[in-house]
Image (tube, rainbow, N blue to C red):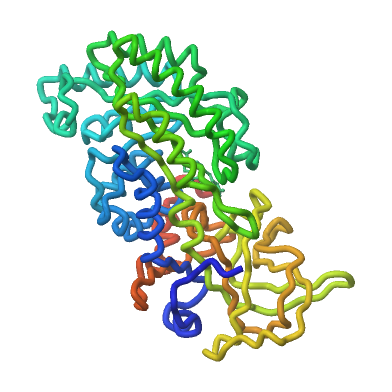
Amino acid sequence: MKYFQASCDYAELAKIYGTPLYLYDLDSIQEQYKNIKASFGGFKSLVCYALKANSNLSIINVLAKIGSGADCVSFNEVKRALLAGIPRYKIIFSGVGKEDYEIREALKAGILFLNVESEMELLRIEQIARELFESPTQTRESNIADCSGNSLAQARISIRVNPDVDAKTHPYISTGLHENKFGLDIQTAKRLYLYAHKSPYLNPVGIHYHIGSQILESSPLLESTHKILDLAKSLLSANIELKFFDIGGGFGISYNDETPFDMAGYISQIVRHIDALDLTAICEPGRFIVGNNGAILTRVLGEKRTSNKKFIIIDCAMNDLLRPSLYRAYHHVSYLGSGQGEQPDTNKTLEKCDIVGAICESGDYIAKDRELPICQKGDLLLIESSGAYGYSMASNYNSRLKPAEVGISKDKHFLIRDRETFDESVQSELRYLNNNKFSV
Ligand code: LLP
């Protein structure tokens, strides 16, 4: 299965930028955004790209240019979105543990709304909004984005409702059950909407749910939609003027041979249901936009055989792509040949092997039991579907340096992040090295 469609000379890219190397097809990223947007037809909608999937500024920027909003889960992500050109009135801020300074900064920045995840957070937002809006040095900035005509000195919020529906995905990325830490149950949410409605500092403008990630079937999402719709209707009839119906993200892609989530079909159902309520639909896709449009180019370091296994050791490891180790996730790996620019010989004998990195853990693998041609040192492989939760979950484990990132558009390639250097990686520690306060 070949997912990464950008036309490029992998051998040349490896030569210019080195490996391991993250590659992104910027044109297909834009296409995928446009497909989602088109599914809404003429219906009022805002597609907020979930930055957590991949927060490279150039990727956010290509999406900003075609009208995307941003779903952020830290104030640093909000800053990234703003830097990359997403207007503040298209930014929403979610997350189960927002710090006070993040709430304050988000209110000052005048983003569209904050998604509230708990009662204590609602009260914190109210308190911080009160301090901000009553302070004589209050910034007027916070009010600019209010295009709804509502009172200006209020924090716009939405409540994340946990519908207690099983998303049928990996337990680590399932979020819509009451056993999960996310959102508020329907009764508590209703009580808090009524509270917020009365508060002079809060303006409940939206309702939100997100039950998990890499969801392939629409039935759990539709079941959730119905529950949240019932709540939205009862809030509207209590004169709570909701404006946004935020259906979250989580739309699954094909990594192996799965049928991708039927986004167009699902959205047509959503639109049908919320049409009568005069709400703007918001969705927060991350993986669906970037997942299959990114790949990692990696080189073979060599092979190793034990009595019953063959290992191909590559220069990419779990610090560069954590998903296989953390979720036993499948990523397709294709053989690209010797890296000298010739076409890979597909008639080469295939052998079963584990494709592993150099990290000191048996959990460090990229693929298990895959058929690959007999590889030589220096051969190139492509690890597919790494655009989402690849670089954004990368680390420096084993003091490895983070890879470079390259964007490809209209047959041209552009560096969009430098490969990390050793000097950069030790910079924040070096000046303490000779601090002998702790010397023995
Ligand atoms: N909105 C909220 C509130 C979320 O929590 C998430 C993802 C998204 C949107 C975007 O979900 P997406 O459309 O990308 O599925 N590291 C995991 C995925 C974690 C997803 C966390 N939340 C992985 O590699 O599969």
Where is residue 278, by image quadrant?
Answer: top left
At a point 37% along the width and 41% down the height, the residue shown is 71
For residue 283, above or below residue 330: above
At a point 13% along the width and 29% down the height, the residue shown is 139
At a point 50% along the width and 84% down the height, the residue shown is 11
For residue 286, above or below residue 377: above
For the image, the number of numbered tags is 0
In depth, the one of 224 and 155 nearer the eye is 224
Q: Is residue 133 left or right of residue 383?
A: left
Residue 271 position, x and y percent, is 39, 35
For residue 267, above or below residue 147: below
Residue 251 position, x and y percent, is 51, 45
Where is residue 331, by image quadrant?
Answer: bottom right
Q: Is residue 244 left or right of residue 399?
A: left
Q: Is residue 97 left or right of residue 205?
A: right
Where is residue 207, by image quadrant?
Answer: top left
Image quadrant containing the N terminus: bottom right
Residue 301 position, x and y percent, is 64, 78
In depth, the one of 341 and 37 nearer the eye is 37
Residue 161 position, x and y percent, is 47, 24
Q: Is residue 421 visible?
A: no
At a point 33% along the width and 24% down the height, the residue shown is 277
Q: Is residue 231 visible?
A: yes
Q: Is residue 241 left or right of residue 313?
A: left
